[in-house]
Structures are given as C-alpha cells and as structure tokens.
Image (cartoon, rainbow, N blue to C red):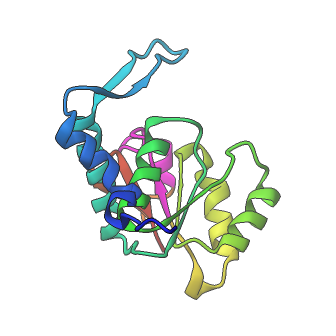
Amino acid sequence: MDAPIARESMIMGSLPARHARYRPHHAAVVIASGADGEHPIRLTWREFDAYVNRWANAMASLGVSRGDRVATVLANSLELLANFWSCAKLGAIAVPVSPLLTAAGLGALIADASPCIVVGTSDQLAMLSELRLQAPPDTRPILVLTDPKVGSDSVVSQRYSNRISCLSKSTSMCSVTA
C-alpha cells in the first residue's frame, strides 16, 4: 500500500525556517574556536535562519535560481554550512569541492560541473580567477569570496580591485566579475 507523500514537509530549504519558528532559542550551529584564538561561534535557529536568508538573498542577487549549480571550495566552516542551506532554499544544487585540490584537479571538476558561481576564499583567488578565465566566455562562473579580509587595504583588493565588489557586510561575501 502506497502512503501519500507530504511534499511540502520534505523541502530541505524550509528546515531552518521551520526550526526558527518552533525552536528559535535552541542551538543550531556551534563552531569551535580556531587555532588563532577565535571565540567559538554559537547560533540559535533564529540567528542561523537569518544568516542563511542573507546568503540566499545575496546569491539570488547574483542570479542563482532553481537548478543552477553553485560550487564551493571551502573548508568546514559556517560559510560552507550557510552556502549549503542557501542553495537548498533557492533550489540550487550545491557542488562541494575540496579546497585541498590542485589547480588541475579543481579545474577538471569545475569544468565538469559548469557552475554559475564558485565560492572560495581570497587565498584561492588567483587560482580561481585563472580557472574562471579558462572557461568559455558565455559560461564563466562568478567568483564569490567569503572572507572579510578583502577590504580596501588588502593586497587582494589592490590587485583585483576592478573585479571585486562586496555584496553585504552582514554576509562577508564579495563577488568577483569581469
């Protein structure tokens, strides 16, 4: 006997909002302090849902929509988690790629996935920019950087100033185009 499927309750992108509604003050994400003495990050479901919504809105402003692929070249982090859940909210496909790959390995995976956006860090900018330029002009992905050190005084922004524009201080995302 077949049971009816509750399709609306199975939408992954709605889970953070659902938990934010019914369990707003419970812990959603806890990230341990790093080796450089950072404080641990603790977000409730309400805070995490708001953070994911900001990421989803930033990605939507870059043109990400249902069915688009978003490659992430990030280590385990709050940004990786937010990117995954924002893809789920938008109906986009998250393509996780190891940040430990060489340029050749990363290039093969990016070429195969043909994402509309590649999310990485400023440490990877030179390699990601080179890979982006190897793609055909009509399918070049937008590069999005997640680390806030891409400020006006950083070496990265001085070198790539014509290609970096910050989307939102609340998300620490910057897009790299052209």
The residue depicted at 73 percent of the width and 73 percent of the height is 112
Residue 60's place in the image compared with 54, above or below, is below
Q: Which residues are magenta?
A: 143-159
Q: Quadrant of residue 135?
A: bottom right
Left or right of 134, for residue 124: left
Front residue of this view, candidates 11 and 80: 11
Front residue of this view, candidates 18 and 170: 18
* Residue 71 place in picture, x, y as percent: 57, 60
* Residue 168 place in picture, x, y as percent: 26, 52
* Residue 166 place in picture, x, y as percent: 32, 55
Residue at the outermost bottom position: 138
Residue 105's place in the image compared with 62, above or below, is above
The residue depicted at 67 percent of the width and 65 percent of the height is 130
Residue at the outermost top position: 37
The residue depicted at 27 percent of the width and 61 percent of the height is 57
Q: Quadrant of residue 4?
A: bottom left
Residue 160's place in the image compared with 68, above or below, is above
Residue 157: in magenta span = yes
Tag count: 0
* Residue 50 place in picture, x, y as percent: 23, 45
The residue depicted at 22 percent of the width and 40 percent of the height is 20
Residue 88: in magenta span = no
Residue 64's place in the image compared with 123, above or below, is below
Front residue of this view, candidates 158 and 90: 90
* Observer able to see residue 169: no
* Observer able to see residue 119: yes
